[in-house]
Amino acid sequence: MRLATLALALALAPSLAVATPYDGLYRPNYDFAAAWDCATVGVEGGALAIEGTRLIGVENTCELGDPVEVRGMNAVLYDATCEGEGEAYDERVMLMAHDFGVYVIRDAMVVDWLSCDATP
C-alpha cells in the first residue's frame, strides 16, 4: 500500500508547483501597455508571467531559486538562471508587490508589471 501511495505522489509531483504571492499574468506599465494581449504568454505583445519558480518574459524564461525575503519590504530576492535568444545567463532578481502588480528589479533596472486582472 505504501508503495502505491509513493508512486501516486511521484506521478503528481510535477503538477504540484510551488506557488508564490507573485503568481499571475502581467503586462508592462507604460503608455502603450493596453495593446498587450493577456491571453498569450512570452511573446512580443503577449503577457508576462510568474508561475511558481518561473518568471516568463518576452522570449525568455528564468528559474527563480534561493528566495530571501527582504526585511521591512514586501519583496523577495532570488538567484535567477535564465535563457533567452539562445543565451543562458545568471542574475539576481527582486520581486516587490504593489497594489496593481509587481516591480521586477534587476541590476540597474526596474520594470513595473501591472496585473492583467487589475485596473489602476
Image (spheres, rainbow, N blue to C red):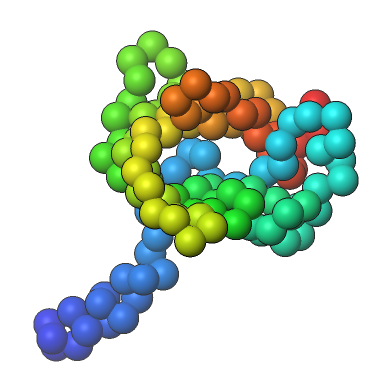
Give the left or right position of residue 98, taking residue 33 as reference.
left
How many discs appear?
A: 0
Instruction: Indicate whether 31 appears above or below 23.
Output: above
Quadrant holding the C terminus: top right
User: Front-most of 26 and 90?
Assistant: 90
Instruction: Indicate whether 89 appears above or below 119.
Output: below
Residue 63 x %, y %: 39, 51
Quarter of the rendering containing residue 75:
top left
Give the left or right position of residue 117, taking residue 99 as reference.
right
> Residue at point 59% right, 49% down?
57
Residue 53 x %, y %: 40, 50
> Residue at point 78% right, 29% down?
30
View extreme (top): residue: 72
> Residue at point 44% right, 56% down?
87
Residue 79 x %, y %: 32, 39
Instruction: Indicate whether 51 appears above or below 33.
Output: below
View extreme (left): residue: 2
View extreme (front): residue: 86
Quadrant holding the N terminus: bottom left
User: Front-most of 84 and 113?
Assistant: 84
Residue 51 at least partly seen: no
Residue 43 at least partly seen: yes
Residue 25 x %, y %: 65, 48
> Residue at point 32% right, 71% down?
13
